[in-house]
Amino acid sequence: MDGSPQGQGDSVTRTLHPGAWWLWALSLATAASRTTNPLLLGLIVAVAGYVAVRCRDTTPWASSYGVFLKFGLVVIASRVVFHVLLGGIAGPTVLFTLPRVPLPDWAQGIRIGGPISAEGLVFSLSQGLQLATLLGCVGAANALANPKRLLRSLPAALYEVSVAVVVTMTTAPQLVASAKSVRRARQLRGDSVRGWRAVRTLLVPVIEDALARSLVLAAAMDSRGYGRGAGLSRGARRLTATLVLSGLVGLCVGVYALLDGTSPAVVGLPALAAGLVLAVAGLVVGSRRVGRSRYRRDRWGVRELLVVASGLGAVAAVLLTAALGSSLLGAADLSPATVPLAVPQLPLLPSVGVLLAVLPVFIAPQRESTHA
Amino acid sequence: MIQFDDVTITYAEAAAPTLADVDLVVPEGELCLVVGRTGSGKSTLLRAVNGLVPHFTGGRLTGRVLVDGRDTRTHPPRELADVVGLVGQDPVAGFVTDSVEEELAYSMESLGLAEQVMRRRVEETLDLLGLAELRHRPLATLSGGQQQRVAIGAALTAQPRVLVLDEPTSALDPGAAEEVLAALQRLVHDLGMTILIAEHRLERVVQYADRVVRLVGADRPPLVGEPSSVLAGSPVAPPVVRLGEAAGWRPAPLSVRDARRLAGPLRERLAGLSPAPPPAAPAETLLRASDVVVRYPGTVALRGVSLSVGAGERIALMGRNGSGKSSLLWALQGTGPRHGGRVAVDGMDPADRRPAERRAAVGLVPQQPTDLLYLESVRAECAKADEEAGAVKGSCRELLDRLLPGVPDGSHPRDLSEGQRLALVLAITLTAAPRVVLLDEPTRGLDYPAKERLAESLRTLADQGRAVLLATHDVEFVAEFATRVVVLAEGEVVSDGPVAEVVTSSPVFAPQVAKVLAPQRWLTVREVSDALGEVTA
């Protein structure tokens, strides 16, 4: 049906491929991981937030974006509190001094209390902001594309894994609901049990309920053809597993090298590429034998590519600036000095790159309410 | 289409077989109803059709089960997915995905159908079951009837030749049940599908059945045949059949329509008589609630409900799924949230008291009675209940024996039947000696004799000066049990009055006997046969 008029008409209204949103958000997150400039980080949060609010669905999981933002604030706060308590960067501008807790000799490296400097505070604030920005990006991806839909578009070889993850994700809220109702029911028996016994009164019914539910679900899935005719030969299974596992190791090494600015770029990109190739090969080998099909498969189109490209643009601008080290492009402003304190400037090229990531607002289908 | 040859099924570690010597043939295009007491093996029979028994559950099956020529011995459930669609008791627990369309497509994806085929069949199924409006909705936001229809649709998209349903209407209000049954009717008549249904609420389905399989215990083979002949003399029979027996009609009518045609002479005989008068207004008010408001994020569950409950009253709380019945019970008990209004029991607000005092004032048996149970044996639960309530040792066990004798002391509460478990939880609740007893949907999963027992026990409680208030969808049970009916809609009380007045004025809430004998106000077979007995005596 690809390319038919109906298919094209479909592509105007359908939602974007979840993978595109996740790649876009992860690109922004990568960009954020390479800078501690609060202005640039703020810009990234603003861009991610704006796109998330404009393009998200009206589905229940879309409202979880606020939770991610709140969690980000908690991260910043705890980073600062830890800095105040345990100290860290010392600087000339001492704001106040906490009483210092004397520690024995063997704990020499650790300090509790002592002078708190403005430089240290700014440093911990921008570190916290960086983590919060990463959370904001993940939250935006979560709001824009249901992670379950993303799992659905995994290759067929990973089908079993993705079903297991989906089922687990469904079970978690059910466990919470079940625990709530049991806690409430406990009051109907007078709520007289305390201590370990109280935990038991809660756990026994909740776990029994969860077990019963999973058995029902397993029976339902079996009756509906789950696992039908999926008999891979032993050799094929081994080949798939080897390829996928070594591919994943390569991917991890590559991603780590890219995110961690201190490792040489020679390691990062090739490892990433090799990992990608191996993993894809494994999935192709594995998928060939699975007799399943997909309803309304999410497809990649021009708009998906544009969304991903806008995210990659942001990360490329940041990486390029850092690699060239050109002061004209704003390399020095990526990690503004905290000793001595300096007013951060917006780095030129990275800011332009991050602003590019707003592009999805103009190409993604809008929420219906914004039409009205 | 479905063929059982001398099938005996014994579960692992069971002393006796659950089903024995079942010989059964269900031809194509029939709607076959499986009836029997709780625990008589209805679910086992159904699950043997697609091979879940014994492939999934374990146990031993002798004999042979053939479905569309395929032997379940060599075909596990997943290999029968294109022939048998199975819809379980709790549709929500069986959902794999989270939106309507994806759920409909799931079986087809497993079968590896082409995408165009899937698109077409999803559209057809949406139309067939009237789900088109709901296609993009998350499953969690649907009502019970809609969820059940999605579950049926999800089984249908694989285009099975046989559809097997385990109590498809047990959790539904009368309106939603009608919706589901109408859809099933259409499948049998328009598509020639073979349907096998197990159901406790026979009054809802028996008129649609071509054939009834009555399981009479594992030591005897089931009775199979025409509905009216198989149900005659059965303890599990809908009120209309029992009315026919009381009136001496042969063959027994199965639907209200058939019965009304025969009922002319009976109505004449009953014309001068009237049902026992409703009990006098209660002397003492035990619970008074005014303007109770309960809100949940995004919705208002109760919008100012006022209610007073007197000693000796037996009140049924009715209304659609989601009309606020459970919220009201929990708010009255004091444990649930309440955002406005007042509740007073003995001049005190139960919500202000400690949980132990609260349950001594108002007892509540929740919809999931098992939430209250956490020990390994009935004995331990009873002992614990005595301790919690500060009652004399053995009080709970004594109450349990009065409600339902013979619940084994050493059994694990999970292994009890629905009726036994309900009796246990009710006994635990009563050990604290509350004067107001609330029950949330107690009749779910109970067969007719168990429901009669429950109605009898609750009547005794009310006669002791307690007040009993229960939420239910079961109109026949309401007719047996209640003195007063309160109907909720959208969180408001829409009618409140003596049972005969409220239920006979509404076609949805009227019990079968009332429909057959309208305009006379008879509600139960017992009332009619008592009245007839007086005449002949």
Image: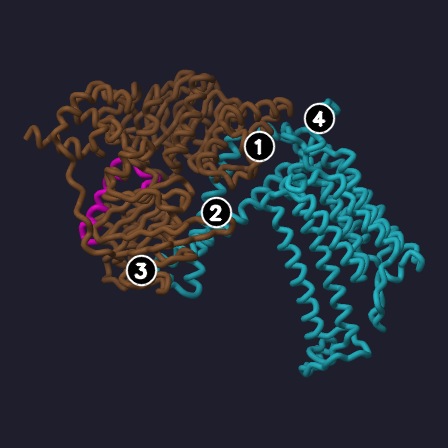
Chain colours: A cyan, B brown
Q: Are marks 1 and 2 in contact (CB under 8 Å)?
A: no
Work out whether mark 2 precedes mark 4 in sequence or the reverse, and give the earlier one. Answer: 4
User: Going by the image, does B275 lie left or right of A269?
Assistant: left
Q: Which residue lies under the disc numbered 2?
A: A210
Q: Residues within 10 Å of mark 4 (few under 14, many from 20)?
A: few
Q: Which residue lies under the disc numbered 3?
A: B344
Q: Amino acid at mark 2?
A: Ala
**CA–CA distance between discs 4 and 3?**
64 Å
**Chain for numbered disc 4:** A
Q: Residues within 10 Å of mark 2 (few under 14, many from 20)?
A: some
**Chain for numbered disc 2:** A
Q: Residues within 10 Å of mark 3 (few under 14, many from 20)?
A: some
Rendered location of residue A247, percent (x, y)? 76, 43
Q: Which residue lies under the disc numbered 1?
A: B101
Residue at (19% x, 21% y) in the render: B264
Image: magenta residue range: B442-465
Rendered location of residue B424, percent (x, y)? 30, 50
Rendered location of residue A223, percent (x, y)? 50, 31
Q: Are marks 2 and 4 in contact (CB under 8 Å)?
A: no
**CA–CA distance between discs 1 and 2?**
26 Å
The mark lying in front, picked from 2 and 3, is 3
Secondary structure category for the residue under label 3: strand
2 and 3 marks on the same chain? no
Rendered location of residue A355, percent (x, y)? 81, 50
**Chain for numbered disc 3:** B
